[in-house]
Image (tube, rainbow, N blue to C red):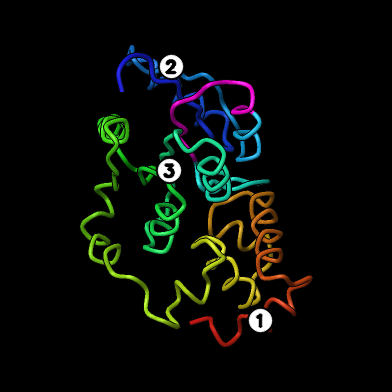
Amino acid sequence: MGGEVRIVVADDHRMVRKAWQLLLSAKQQYTVVGQAANGAEVLQLLQTMRADLVLMDLDMPVMNGFDATEQIKKRYPWIKVIGLTQQKESGYIKKLFALGASAYLTKNASDEELFEALEHVLDEKRYLSREVSDVLSKSLLTPPSEGSADQVFMGLSAREIEIVKLIASGHTTLQISNTLHLSIKTIESHRRNIFKKLQVKNVAQMIGKVKDRIV
């Protein structure tokens, strides 16, 4: 893609968004045209502005990066999405690529790797973070077998599965927040999403639905 590349950055931490904007501004061809604190805000921005690419944090409240990516690719299939997260599980990566994202980067990636990913994506190629590519490349090429964890928890992200297991083992919201180094607000948002996806109304129903599937 030649010329200016218009980018929206999405992360629930304002300082992280500012850091991305500062980094991208160092390259003349990249212009940050909008910032969002969650997936719903990304979709609102895209209704009123033209963008070529979204740098998308996957763990956000209100609407996470997976759901936002799915909606973006349905409404604006030409927009590229690069997912950024701390997670390295194969289920996370497979799900994001299945939704139409073009790249998966861990937040430990260097500045140079981010720009390398941008170049690949804009050249119509997919990019997988170096930190996980060696470990997961084989897994990504192998479809999940029937009854595997990926299929059992098909509707849940890797982070949501982690939270389900912690809730089922008796952890409180505060304890989960401390364990995962996420805000209480984020944990509560994940909890609401879990209940919605599993179609349950409380913890007891949730545990009853997954008790035979949690390893």
Camera-near label (3 vs 2) is 2
Q: Residues within 10 Å of mark 3 (few under 14, many from 20)?
A: many
Q: On the image, numbered disc 2 is attached to which residue?
A: 31
Task: Identify the residue at image location x=44%, y=52%.
Answer: 96
Task: Identify the residue at image location x=47%, y=74%.
Answer: 151
First reached walking from the N terminus: tag 1 or tag 3: 3
- The percent coordinates of residue 1 (x first, y second) are 31, 23
Identified by mark 1, the residue type is Lys
- The percent coordinates of residue 192 (x first, y second) are 71, 59
Q: On the image, numbered disc 3 is attached to which residue?
A: 84
- The percent coordinates of residue 129 (x first, y second) are 29, 46
Specify whether 188 is left or right of 8.
Answer: right
Q: Is residue 54 magenta?
A: yes
Q: Are marks 1 and 2 in contact (CB under 8 Å)?
A: no
Chain part drawn in magenta: 45-56
Q: Between marks 1 and 3, how big is the CA–CA gap?
A: 30 Å
Specify whether 6 is left or right of 179.
Answer: left
Mark linked to residue 209: 1
